Image (spheres, grey):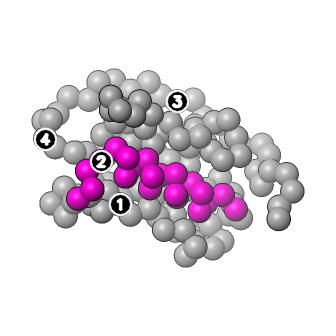
Amino acid sequence: MTVGMINANPVVHERPERASHPHAADVLDPLDVFGRVLQSSPHTVRDIKDPEHPYSLEQLSVLSEESVSVDETLGRIQITFTPTVQHCSMATVIGLCLRLKLMQNFPPHFKVDIKVAPGSLANEESVG
């Protein structure tokens, strides 16, 4: 068992303000996934807190709008996240948090793929 924090001093980035996102209501895009706020769940994947810190995954640059892709034709949402350190023991927990948030906020016909950015984690194959 690890004692203390894996990354005691992470780099914290400012959260950019997001303007309203006008588009056809029936089209799902990456910003909807990254920042979608529903009546039933006011929090989005950008709001998920890091397991070790009081900061969001967005603030730690673990997750960004660019790390989300949506293919409505195939019914697939894919998120690729980047842990703050290569030996992050919380990567599996982060992946599970992302999966749960997507499953709670999007219809069950969407297949959810959660991946770790290539080369960003020593044991990438354990997450997904």
Mark 4 burial class by Cα count in 10 Å: few <14, some 14-19, many 20+? few
Where is residue 55? Give x, y as percent: 63, 36
Amino acid of disc 3:
Arg
Amino acid of disc 4:
Asp
Whether the magenta-drawn stretch holds residue 90 is answered as yes
Instruction: Tell me the residue at 82%/65% (across/down).
Output: 1
User: Residue lying furthest right in this view?
Assistant: 3
Q: In which quarter of the view is residue 89 placed?
A: bottom right
Against 65, is 90 above or below? below
Tell me the distance, in whole angstroms, between the alpha carbons under discs 4 and 3. Answer: 27 Å
Mark 2 burial class by Cα count in 10 Å: few <14, some 14-19, many 20+? some
The residue that mark 1 highlights is: 112
Kindly check if marks 2 and 1 are in contact, taking CB atoms under 8 A apart as contact: yes
Q: Which residues are magenta?
A: 89-109
Tell me the distance, in whole angstroms, between the alpha carbons under discs 1 and 3. Answer: 25 Å
**First-in-chain label (2 vs 3):** 3
Amino acid of disc 2:
Phe
**SS class, disc 4:** loop
The residue that mark 3 highlights is: 15
Where is residue 113? Give x, y as percent: 38, 63
Q: In which quarter of the view is residue 127 placed?
A: bottom right
Mark 3 burial class by Cα count in 10 Å: few <14, some 14-19, many 20+? few
Where is residue 73? Give x, y as percent: 15, 60
Q: Nearer the viewer, residue 77 or 110?
A: 110
Label disc, if present, on residue 106 of the rendered structure = 2
Whether the magenta-drawn stretch holds residue 101 is answered as yes
**SS class, disc 1:** strand
The residue that mark 4 highlights is: 26
